[in-house]
Amino acid sequence: MLLDSLDLTADAFADATGWVAKPEGMCKGDSCVPAPGTIGDDGTLDVAAVAERLGMALVADDDAGIWALGPESGGRALTTATVPPIELPDIDGNPFTLTAMHGRKVLLVAGASWRGCSADLPVWQALHEELEPLGLSVVTVALDLDPGKARPWIERAAPTHPSLVDSDHRVDELLGISNVPMAVWIDETGTLVRPAEGASVQPSPFAAMEITDEMPERLQAVLREFKQMPETGPAYRAAIVDWAQRGADSPYAMSPDEVVAASQPRSADHSRAAACFELGVAAERRRDHPAAVAWWKQAHALFPDNWTYKRQAWTLESTPEGADSDKAQEVQDTYGTSWSDEFLATGGANYTVIPKL
């Protein structure tokens, strides 16, 4: 959340973070944190005091005269299974609010042009068409700083489901998404029934690819790591279909407490990384690329397992002007690393959150 002042109305704070000021304190879902003395008589919040109470990193960009507020920390990525109001635009800038989907099950899938999700979008569209009669809608979200990079592959797929753009990576902060493709399941009441996890509904083409001696050694190593990743696509698809058919009776639907417990840990460093990433986005938008790189380097160091932060930044260095987003993101002088370097260091088995089905 970007701020140009540390005085903010309680309503604006709730809209951005999901934390609502109540007599008992700051509340999100059924979780409340006492916050005495943080709310003025006029309804204005002392943002610094609230941030301290909730474990939210508050990071200042003194040169730009702004602050960024990271998400709550000290526990899990999710404080509650209740999905906060999330409004995102489509590629034409038309706003869409997730609450409009109340009454239907929602499979929210995050992707990006810099990962190659253009090939996935027709697959998600087909699943949407198959399961829509059962009361399930797919919502896809492109994590692209430049919506123009997402436009070509969204237009080619011509989705009839909501296909949105999250240039600020809000779903990272609000839903715990740290790589793509990842998905969350949301029931008819707006409650998560599965937390953010790796999302694929078909076998990985890379895992099936034959490794030959004629391939470059680096490509051979990458493919070997892909083959170490558990194959969950068909099982994940079957689980989604089961949930569409059976709803809360599906064995794959979790209780709210189980969802929170299964979400990824979120440390104070992770919260600060989110704030640094957002300050980098702000710098990039005002065409101060060196400042953006400096903030993004901090975000990468603080949260090295967040691939959306890294790959979004890397692709800006490795994509020629006017070209489609580079998906390989190979060696760049700016960051001193590349996608394949870090993928090989991490290992295929640890690259994403594997669904436990």
Image (cartoon, helix red, strand yellow):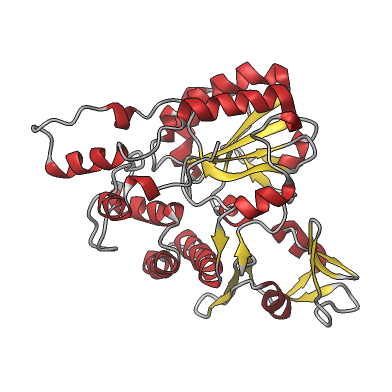
Q: Up-down: is 342 above or below 303?
A: above
Say which quadrant the C terminus sits in. Answer: top right
Q: Is residue 318 above or below residue 251?
A: below
Q: Residue at x 25, y 54 (%)?
A: 341
On screen, residue 51 above or below 293: below
Q: Quadrant of the N terminus?
A: bottom right
| Residue at the extreme bottom | 37
Q: Is 352 in front, or is 89? A: 352
Q: Is residue 160 visible?
A: no
Residue visible at 67% across and 78% down in the picture: 52
Q: Quadrant of residue 120?
A: top left
351 vs 86, nearest the viewer: 351
Work out whether residue 307 or residue 275 is closer to the camera in this orientation and state it. Answer: 307
Quarter occupied by residue 322: top left
Is the residue 32 above or below the residue 202 in the image? below
The spot of residue 69 in percent (x, y) is 62, 69
Q: Is residue 329 left or right of residue 35?
A: left
Q: Is residue 352 left or right of residue 69?
A: left
Point 91% across, 70% down: residue: 23
Image spot of residue 228 (x, y percent): 32, 40
Residue 65 at what x, y percent from top left? 57, 77
Q: Quadrant of residue 202?
A: top left
Place of residue 42 in the rendered image (x, y in percent of width and height, measured from the top left): 89, 75
Question: Depth check: 262 or 284 in front?
Answer: 262
Residue at 61 percent of width and 18 percent of height: 129
